[in-house]
Image (cartoon, helix red, strand yellow):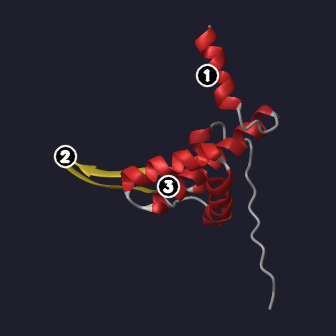
């Protein structure tokens, strides 16, 4: 049995912001509506399916071990009633986090949001 590995290359020149990256991965929201009729919102799945598959297990781990992602997941699961939607939202959040860490050339700081809230309140 041959071990198949998926390789994909993200070209930094093509991706200029987070919105383009999420679209590249197929994690952008597609809203179906026409006139007064409104359908379900789903992810577009137009991007690279391997990237979505690679982000799935880290999303599960971050839901289990990261307090902020667990709170985010529970809030979405409570409002949407489906756990898969919450996992996909956390996957998207992880992709954005990875991109911002890479783009800003910084390390991961779990209390980053809390520190920014304190700074903004003091100002």
Going by the image, does 34 lie left or right of 123? Answer: left
Quarter of the image for the N terminus: give it.
bottom right
Residue identified by numbered label 3: 86
Position of residue 5 relative to residue 61, above or below, is: below
**Which residue is disc 2 drawn over?**
35
Kindly check if marks 3 and 2 are in contact, taking CB atoms under 8 A apart as contact. no
Q: CA distance from mark 3 to mark 2?
A: 28 Å
Residue at 61 percent of width and 15 percent of height: 120
Q: Secondary structure at mark 2?
A: loop
Q: Which element is circle 3 on?
A: helix
Which comes before the other along the chain, label 3 or label 2?
Answer: 2
Q: Nearer the viewer, mark 2 or mark 1?
A: 1
Indicate which label's residue lies in the foreground, 3 or 2. 3
Asked if the residues shown at circle 3 and circle 1 are in contact, with their CB atoms under 8 angstroms apart, the answer is: no
Relative to residue 107, is residue 32 depicted above or below?
A: below
Q: Residue furthest bottom?
A: 1
Relative vertical location of residue 106 with respect to residue 29 in this rendering, above or below:
above
Q: Position of residue 117 (x, y in %)?
A: 61, 22
Residue under numbered circle 1: 117
Is 62 displayed left or right of 46 in the figure?
Answer: right
């Amino acid at each position: 049995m041959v071990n198949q590995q998926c390789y994909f290359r993200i070209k930094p020149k093509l991706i200029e912001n987070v919105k383009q990256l999420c679209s590249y991965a197929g994690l952008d929201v597609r809203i179906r509506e026409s006139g007064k009729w409104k359908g379900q919102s789903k992810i577009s799945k137009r991007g690279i399916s391997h990237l979505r598959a690679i982000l799935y297990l880290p999303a599960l781990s971050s839901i289990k071990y990261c307090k902020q992602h667990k709170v985010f997941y529970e809030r979405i699961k409570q409002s949407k009633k489906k756990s898969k939607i919450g996992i996909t939202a956390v996957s998207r959040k992880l992709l954005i986090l990875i991109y911002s860490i890479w783009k800003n050339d910084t390390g991961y700081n779990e209390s980053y949001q809390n520190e920014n809230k304190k700074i903004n309140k003091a100002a």
